Amino acid sequence: MPETPVDLALAHAERNGAIYVDELKRLVRIPSVSFAGFPEAEVARSADAVAELLRRRGFERVEVLRVEGAHPYVVGERIEDPAAPTVLLYAHHDVQPAGDPGAWRSPPFEPVERDGRLYGRGAADDKAGVILHAAAVDAWVRGARRLPLNVKIVIEGEEEIGSEHLPAFLARHRERLSADAMVLADTGNVETGVPSITVALRGLVTVDVEVRALEQSLHSGMWGGPVPDPAMALARMLSSLVDADGQIAVPGLLERVRPLTPAQREAIAALPVGPEEFRRQARLRPGVALLGGRHPLETIWWRPSLTVNALQASSRRDARNIVNDVAWARVGVRLVPDQDPAEVRERLVAALRAAAPWGVELTFAVETAGPPWATDLAHPAFAAAFRALEKGYGRRALAVGCGGSIGFVEPFARALGGAPAILVGVEDPASSPHSENESVDLADLHRGIRSAIHLLGELGEALRPAPGGPAGAPAT
């Protein structure tokens, strides 16, 4: 039987799998930390390396683009037929800081293979996403000699710091990025080897609160007792935000939370991860309780959460016998569909004000206010994606939520006129993105590449114009 184009593409990827891993290692070696205070030149060097990779893997018109104040973007395309449908591919090449060097088992920017995983900062989040896209296009171009549709690609350089300049970038380059669907490779699977498509993201509101009672810190023996302790005041305020089970107790904040649909309940019940497995994935200490009274992934995907991200009065190094003059905390709330960031912010600030004791002075600053996102699976691009992942992994793909927030999804979808956004990736619970010892499972990396190859083929069919219909209108 003659080999089909997708068979040829898959065979090419199989032959070149080790090369794709080496290319991922090459990207991981570049410390492309986008945070302020880290070398901007390394992010620029990363962009150049990504551009060179895309050119080598079959993309054309590859450029490093900038908007004022932003780390560089990399864009490219390959247009096989202007009348054919087009998919826009997304990933990002910037990474988080390494964190505690002493907590890494190997240097964060020296990729090391260990027990079937590749360790290094960015190995999963999100330089693996860059490799998924590059390898899939390479497999079609060099294996099958032709892509099944047109592709465009954007590799962002500041996703890890909130994509602040993305709206300006999209406004400037909107026409160049036009597409019928998007594939964003920056999420993950519910478990290693279990293909997953993310269909909902939580939003995020973060508020800084500063509590002050004194002009300067005072000797705790000479003044402690009658003088209010700002750290204790802040502790009382923070504890008022949750109930005895650790669930949000901010008045009115849960009013807009939707009950689960029957389909969502069925999806939760079918998950291969239960509470005990979740405890292991989260590395929960023995005897520590799970909170919420629901399946933990239901709580993460479909319920808002409140976390104290940082807390400071003095420091462990500088601890002295004093009443601190000031205490500070950053409080983060993750939002679910129908919750409005502005309303959540107002309710959170009001609750903190109401709980403040002893007349302490309060100062607030809003750091982040991003909305939640959810998608409708009715578009045929999603059926194509589920088929592709099942073929790539050899098992049925799941529709999952994500407790995190990915700020670029909604602006991209809006800029492209509501084009369907397919969120995939190869992170898993053991990947530890943003933490020490980040890693990617190499078997899943190869499964992800196979899925990405199938996805281009499936989308080429699903997005093909119906007879007599406009380009990009899916066939029925």
Image (cartoon, rainbow, N blue to C red):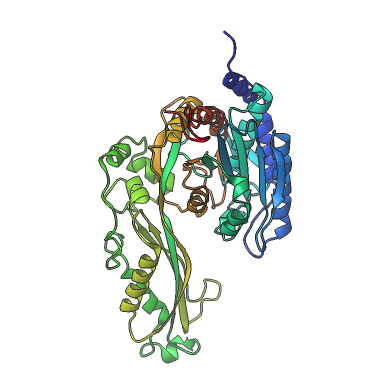
Q: Quadrant of residue 28?
A: top right
Q: Is residue 218 found left or right of 41 in the rendered image?
A: left
Furthest residue in direction front, as rendered: 468
| Residue 53 x, y percent position in the rendering | 71, 39
Q: Quadrant of the N terminus?
A: top right
Q: Nearer the viewer, residue 432 or 253?
A: 253
Can residue 97 be seen at all in this image of the molecule? no
Can residue 95 be seen at all in this image of the molecule? yes
Q: Is residue 43 above or below residue 81?
A: below
Q: Nearer the viewer, residue 35 or 81?
A: 81
| Residue 459 x, y percent position in the rendering | 51, 31
| Residue 6 x, y percent position in the rendering | 57, 22
Q: Nearer the viewer, residue 412 or 433?
A: 412
Please name the residue shown 37% across and 50% down the image.
Answer: 300
Q: Is residue 414 found left or right of 67 in the rendered image?
A: left
Q: Quadrant of the C terminus?
A: top left
Q: Is residue 144 above or below residue 171?
A: above
Please name the residue shown 55% across and 32% down the image.
Answer: 452
Q: Quadrant of residue 50?
A: top right
